[in-house]
Image: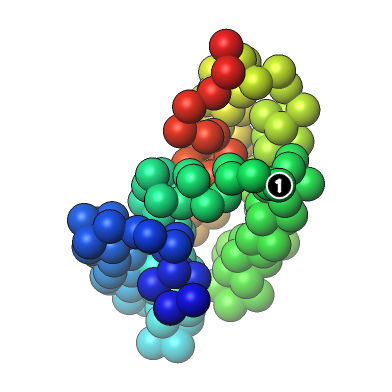
Amino acid sequence: MTLTDRLIAPGATRGEIVTAFTAAIAGAAMAFGLALHADLTLWRATVVAFVAFDMFGGAVVNATGSAKRWYHGPGRTSRHHLGFVAIHVQPFILALVVPDFTWLAAAAIYTLTLIGAITVTASPAALRRPIAFGATAFAVIVATSVLTVPHALTWFAPVLLIKLLLAHLLPEEFAQ
């Protein structure tokens, strides 16, 4: 298995690879610039950029046909999908390194994402897509209007939710 197979999916097309890395690099560059503009130190801005690389790139990767075939292939269960969501501890990494990104905000974003994932995977297949969008919309309003996060990181929760609830959890096609 190649590095591209691991980062994107086995059999990823050239277009999927280019699109994913373009989004990852552009997202990382924008987040890095926002972090520096917010007067974060270079090392903190670099951590933010690495998180952004994963979030933006992952949002695109998880939406590709190759990743859909890989993550929703034979033998993949809700347990696999929930495990994938659960290992995304980036909110806590940001709380650790970014002043004013509180542990409460990190826990709330992580919990909203996990509850959304549980709700989606526990739903009937025909309702998963609308439930995923509803859970994402609800979590976005909480993350952007109720929680307080540094301005330079207001992108984080929406992109995390898109990556996990909309791109990762939803198969390319679903049974009616």
Residue 1 in percent (x, y) is at: 49, 76
Q: Residue at x 46, y 51 (%)?
A: 67
Q: Between residue 64 and residue 22, name the one nearer to us.
A: 64
Q: Between residue 63 and residue 176, name the one nearer to us.
A: 176
State the count of labels: 1
Q: Is residue 134 above or below residue 162?
A: above
Q: Which residue is mark 1?
A: 75
Q: Residue at x 62, y 71 (%)?
A: 93
Q: Is residue 37 above or below residue 172?
A: below
In the picture as drawn, the residue positioned furthest to the top comes out as 176
Residue 117 in percent (x, y) is at: 68, 38
Q: Residue at x 77, y 28 (%)?
A: 122
Q: Residues within 10 Å of mark 1 (few under 14, many from 20)?
A: few
Q: How is the image coloured?
A: rainbow
Q: Quadrant of residue 113?
A: top right
Q: Between residue 172 and residue 1, name the one nearer to us.
A: 1
Residue 97 in percent (x, y) is at: 58, 77
Q: Quadrant of residue 129?
A: top right
In the picture as drawn, the residue positioned furthest to the front comes out as 74
Q: Is residue 93 above or below residue 60?
A: below
Q: Quadrant of residue 104?
A: bottom right
Residue 57 in sight: yes
Q: Residue at x 35, y 59 (%)?
A: 12
With 6 as the anchor, is 28 left or right in this view? left
With 133 as the anchor, is 4 left or right in this view? left
Q: Quadrant of the C terminus?
A: top right
With 134 as the anchor, is 86 left or right in this view? right
Residue 140 in sight: no
With 23 as the anchor, is 134 left or right in this view? right
The secondary structure type at the circle numbered 1 is loop
Q: As shown in the figure, which amino acid type bears the numbered disc 1?
A: Gly
Residue 34 in percent (x, y) is at: 32, 65
